[in-house]
Each structure stands twice: as structure tokens, then as C-alpha cells.
Image: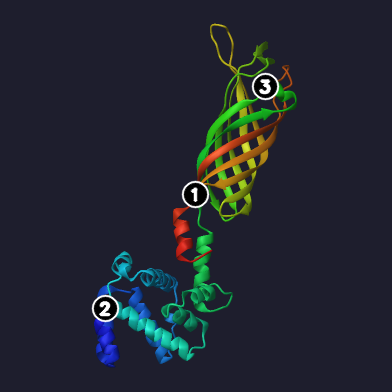
Amino acid sequence: GKQIVRFRKESKIDSLTMVLEFWEKYCGDNEPLRRYRIIDKIIKGENINEFIDSNTVYYLLDFRERRIVINADPKKEIIINQRFNYPLLPEFDSMTIALADSLYLSKKHAETDVDLFLLAYSQRFDDFIALSYAKTESEIQKTFNKEYMKYKNMHELNIGLQSGIWVPFGNMSLVGNHPAFGFFVGYKKRKIMVDWTFYMKMLKSNNEYVVYKDGRAFLTNYFFGGYIGLDVACFLMEKSKHKIPLRLGFAIDGWDALKKDIEKEIPSKSFIVPNVNIGIEFMYFLTKFSFLSLELKGTYLKINNDRGTDISGPAMTALLKYGFHGSGKKENFKKHLCIK
């Protein structure tokens, strides 16, 4: 770094070129080397398109993040340079910042891409970010947009536990209310979320009803149920603390109505009912990723209880959930790309 600064001041172009070639040969492409080459080409009025790619975007953002920390607390310069694996002394940063500032103030640039580089390298970071996401057709803005679309398309995990109550209505109310407990796991992409959800329903029914099995009638209040389904959700609202997904579920619902007992000659009997349900969920985020939510969903279950009590009817499920929703990788991506 010191040699580059010295040779630049002394206008020893051949020596400077040799140092740069040696640096690139043994260290490969890196942020400070690319920064210097870009500024040098702007000074010479040469085309800089060869440097515009996703690496440049992240080099610019790394430079921004590193300099913000150093400007806020110069004592942290050694620590932050180690974190970014930045090998050069402060003199190199000072030189490139001064060159970029002089170029920007001289107004000898006419292209948006040049503006962006000079804004970043002269530490005008707010203007740099604002222009980076402006809707123009510069090459570097297109590259920023590609990286932004990568962020938008990243998956987010949705996983947790759920408990609540299953409430039947109409003829099915004979079966009674039952507590439910289970889990869910899925993922979200953009505004669509897909979850596998499972819960058990427990405790005996409040009332007895008639079921038929093997030509015999049985009076029962036995109940042990389950639900397994695939939910597709579309987010109606997404805020930092609140999200509201509308849910459509395709599920297998049902319960055991008779428990097999060989001594009493009681056979097993189960009701298994495919169904479609619809619901809504109100999510409140306790932290960046953990949340509590209330889900309400309803369906109609057509129970095939031939010759027995008619227990078909609508049912509603209310579930209190605690879970993890999000992606640490996506959040870091968002922070690094300065997405609000």
C-alpha cells in the first residue's frame, strides 16, 4: 500500500504498474486493488464496464461498511480491517478517498456508473445508496437490481409448536370440543408460504353417539383424533412486528371413535375425512425471528357414519403458535445490500 501511494505521488508509472501486477498475481482480485484500478481508469477517462459485476457491488458495500465503522471510531480500524481481511495501511484509503473526492468535485464525470463509484469512494454513502437503487439503466444499477432480486427470492424458514382447541358445530357438536397440540414446518418465498402442519386432538367426547361396525351398533364417547395437512398462505400484510397470512389448507382430519378391545369384543372404528379449510393468522414478532400468533380456521367435515348418528358438520380450530420465522442469511443479505 505504501509503495502504491509513494509511486503515485512521484508519478513513477512503470514502478506503480509493476507493483499492481505483482499484487494481483499473488493476491488475486480484491477490493482495494479493484478500487484503485477503477479510480485510475476514471482519471484517464477510460471505460470502466469491465469492473462492473456482482463482486464490485459487494466490494463497494464492504468498503462502505468498513469506512462507516472507522469514521465512527478510528480506534476500531485494526479490528474492522482484520474482520474484512483488509491488509493495507490507512494511507492507501486516504489516497483513494482524496482522489475520488477531487474527481467528484471536479464534475468531470458524466455517466451514472462513474457517479456511483465516486460517491462511494469519496464516502458520500447516503447518496451512493440512494442512486444505487434509482430506476435508471446504468450497468451497476442493473447489477444492484440483480442482487436485490436474489434477496427477494431467498427462502425463509417457518417452524414451531402449536396448541389450541377444536370446536365442532351443528350435528358434530355431539362430539364436543377437544384440545389440540402439534407442530408445523414450512418455508416462505416472497409473499407465499407453504407449511406442513400436524396436531393431535385428545380427551373423550362430552356425549355418546352411535356408530356401526361389522353390522353391530356401539354407543361411544371415545375420541382420539389427528390432523395432517398442507397449508398454502398468502401474506396480506407484512410489517416489522406484525404479519397477516391468509391460509388455504388441504388436509386429512379425523378421529378414532372405537378403541379395539378383544375381551369386550369391541372392534376399532375411525373416521378419516379429506377436507379443504380456510383460515387467517395474526403474527406478532417478539424478536427479529421469533413470534407468537393466533390462527383461526374453519372447514366442513362430511362424516360417513352409515346407520349411525349423523355427526357431520362445520368445525373451527383456534391455534396459538410459537415459532421461528425468517432467515439469518437473508437478513444479513438485506443488511449488506442496505435494503430498508
Left or right of 86 in this view: 311: right
Front residue of this view, candidates 252 and 126: 126
Name the residue at 38% across, 72% down.
71
Q: Label 2: how many residues lie within 10 Å, few (<14), some (14-19) or many (20+)?
A: some
* Dot 3 amino acid type: Val
Q: Position of residue 317 (x, y in %)?
A: 64, 33
Image quadrant occupied by the N terminus? bottom left
- The residue at which mark 2 appears reads as 23
* Mark pair 3, 2: CA separation: 78 Å
Query: In the picture shown, does residue 2 fall above or below 183?
Result: below
Name the residue at 68% across, 16% down.
207
* Mark pair 2, 1: CA separation: 45 Å
Sequence-wise, the earlier of marks 3 and 2 is: 2
* Dot 2 amino acid type: Trp
Front residue of this view, candidates 68 and 238: 68
Sequence-wise, the earlier of marks 1 and 3 is: 3
Query: In the picture shown, does residue 238 fall above or below 277?
Result: below
Sequence-wise, the earlier of marks 2 and 1 is: 2
- Secondary structure beneath disc 1? loop
Report which quarter residue 81 is drawn in. Answer: bottom left
Kindly report which numbered mark, 1 or 3, lies closer to the viewer in this rendering: 1
Q: Residue 43 carries which label?
A: none
- The residue at which mark 1 appears reads as 287
Report which quarter residue 314 is drawn in. Answer: top right
Left or right of 33 in this view: 64: right
